[in-house]
Image (cartoon, helix red, strand yellow):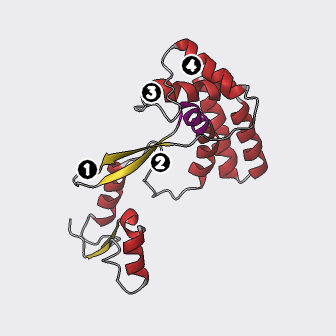
Amino acid sequence: MEDEVRRLRQRIFTASKAGDLARVRNLQKLMLRSRANTLQSVRRVTERNAGRLTAGVDGEVVLTPEAKARLVERIEHATEPFKAWPVRRVYIPKPGSHKRRPLGIPVIADRAHQARVVNALEPEWEARFEPRSYGFRPGRGCHDAIEAVYHAVKGKDPKRRWALDADLAGALDSSSHCRSVHGGGLEQAGFGLWDHVDD
């Protein structure tokens, strides 16, 4: 099952690298119809995901093999077109702060649908992304970004002599965005520029 999904993802990636968009679309449609993709997606959201025990607004948690089989059948043989349920809104504390941030918890069926679509779309976009992009990408993390920065600034005559630190989430909230657009400057918008990075 997992090998079939992995091979199909690789075919989508290869077609996207080659620029064959018609083939990419056909392979993505095949992935969305694939039973192996549905099985793997249900397994991911019911067994491997850290939030598998958290219910959405419908109160459903899928734990038993019989419930997983029913979820697979419900996803594959839907009688109506897919329509997402509302998310359950929970406020969780922000790390290092007394503020709380909202977290939306979808129902388990919506999570499985999202996982199915990720398997179809992710390989196409992985082939197109910038090679030095590290945020929210499979198989990449902050350790890869740190290594890339280290290699860019090491040595007597580094390729780069500055680094840009940007807090985009802070820059795009309503108050700081208004300050940055209307003369508040980059520093107020969460951007910092460091000159002459030392080893």
Image point (43%, 68%), residue name: 172
Residue 114 visible here: yes
Question: Residue 137 has which mark?
Answer: 2
Q: Main secondary structure of the magenta part?
A: helix
Image point (77%, 42%), residue name: 26
Label 4 vs 1, first from the N-terminus:
4
Question: Residue 49 has which mark?
Answer: none
Q: Which residues are magenta?
A: 107-116
Query: For this rendering, which residue is in front, 149 or 41?
Result: 41
Contact, mark 1 vs mark 2 (Cβ under 8 Å) = no
Circle 3: residue type:
Arg
Q: Residues within 10 Å of mark 4 (few under 14, many from 20)?
A: some
Circle 2: residue type:
Arg
Label 4 vs 3, first from the N-terminus:
3
Circle 1: residue type:
Pro
The answer for how far apart the CA atoms under marks 2 and 3 are is 18 Å
